[in-house]
């Protein structure tokens, strides 16, 4: 029987120096592949707005959409820890609304916890979620939901003041109850220092090898999304090109009459007797 991946298990991994692997996935097929590959946990990210829905940013994604995709991921990866991304507008207005939406994501979507973006200002919400038995992954650094405020996708923590702000935020969010801290687009030496200063695991995306674990969007690592490729993405395959070529071959064979052939069709016994009787 496969051991279910849990938050306490990943805490043990940090303490043992064992790296944690996270993938962002959005449906049954990708979740099944991720679990079979040995991924520790899956983030149902609001990045689905980009790679699944074709939006320019993550802002249009809703709680209902995260729940919808989480259900598929849960069915595909029953033994993997699944984290639901709290989308823009689902937790900023009031703490009560944030707790209500997070509970929905766990009850209806089957998530094992939630991820939310922000710095020290999110500490009260994380405390409330923790008290409501909702495990929280905090997300600091470059936070895509603040794309308009930040003026674009930019590396964070490049000055003394900005770096100290990230360190303070990480410690404050851990104290509030966050079980993990994700850092995005943070200089590697700074991310390493933050990792060393925290008891809980850190997950990096564009934050260097000093984090306790790493996360990539599966569409990116498999070469399935060509609209934008961040510097921190390593493409482990060119699945998009391979699938496009397969589709093009299918188009060519249908138009040329090669498909379907006899091997991919069903025969009719006694066709010479049956067909003439039809009208």
Image (cartoon, rainbow, N blue to C red):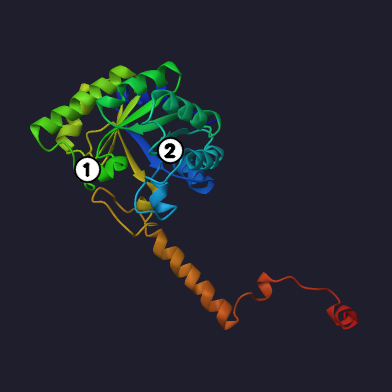
- The x, y position of residue 123, in whole percent, is 30, 22
Frontmost residue, 269 versus 178: 178
> Regarding mark 2 in the picture, which secondary structure is present there?
strand
Frontmost residue, 107 versus 18: 107
Mark 2 or mark 1: which comes first in sequence? 2
The residue identified by callout 1 is 150
| Number of the front mark, 2 or 1 | 1
**CA–CA distance in space, label 2 to label 1:** 27 Å
Residue at the spot x=65%, y=76% of the render? Answer: 261
Frontmost residue, 150 versus 44: 150
Residue 113 lies, with reference to residue 260, above or below; the image says above
Taking the image as shown, residue 96 lies to the left or right of residue 169, namely right
Residue 157 falls in image quadrant: top left
Taking the image as shown, residue 157 lies to the left or right of residue 8, namely left
Residue at the spot x=51%, y=38% of the render? Answer: 67
The residue identified by callout 2 is 42
Quadrant in the picture for the C terminus? bottom right
- The x, y position of residue 126, in whole percent, is 36, 22
Q: Are marks 2 and 1 in contact (CB under 8 Å)?
A: no
> Regarding mark 1 in the picture, which secondary structure is present there?
helix
Taking the image as shown, residue 142 lies to the left or right of residue 137, namely left
Residue at the spot x=53%, y=37% of the render? Answer: 74
């Amino acid at each position: 029987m496969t051991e279910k991946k849990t938050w306490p298990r990943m805490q043990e991994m940090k303490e043992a120096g064992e790296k944690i692997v996270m993938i962002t996935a959005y449906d049954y097929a990708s979740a099944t592949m991720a679990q079979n590959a040995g991924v520790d946990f899956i983030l149902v990210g609001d990045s689905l707005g980009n790679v699944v829905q074709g939006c320019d940013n993550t802002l249009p994604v809703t709680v209902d959409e995260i729940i919808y995709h989480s259900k598929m991921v849960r069915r595909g990866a029953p033994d993997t820890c699944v984290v639901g991304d709290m989308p823009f507008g689902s937790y900023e207005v009031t703490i009560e609304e944030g707790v209500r939406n997070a509970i929905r994501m766990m009850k209806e979507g089957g998530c094992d916890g939630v991820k939310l973006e922000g710095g020290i200002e999110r500490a009260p919400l994380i405390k409330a979620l923790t008290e409501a038995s909702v495990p929280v992954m905090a997300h600091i650094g470059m936070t895509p939901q603040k794309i308009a405020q930040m003026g674009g996708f930019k590396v964070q923590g490049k000055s003394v003041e900005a770096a100290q702000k990230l360190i303070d935020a990480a410690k404050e969010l851990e104290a509030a109850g966050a079980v993990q801290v994700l850092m995005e687009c943070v200089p590697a030496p700074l991310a390493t220092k933050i990792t060393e200063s925290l008891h809980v695991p850190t997950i990096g995306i564009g934050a260097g090898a000093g984090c306790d674990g790493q996360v990539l969007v599966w569409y990116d690592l498999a070469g399935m999304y060509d609209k934008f490729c961040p510097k921190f993405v390593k493409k482990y395959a060119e699945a998009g090109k391979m699938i496009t070529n397969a589709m093009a071959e299918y188009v060519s064979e249908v138009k040329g009459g090669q498909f379907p052939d006899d091997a991919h069709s069903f025969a009719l016994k006694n066709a010479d007797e049956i067909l003439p009787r039809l009208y």
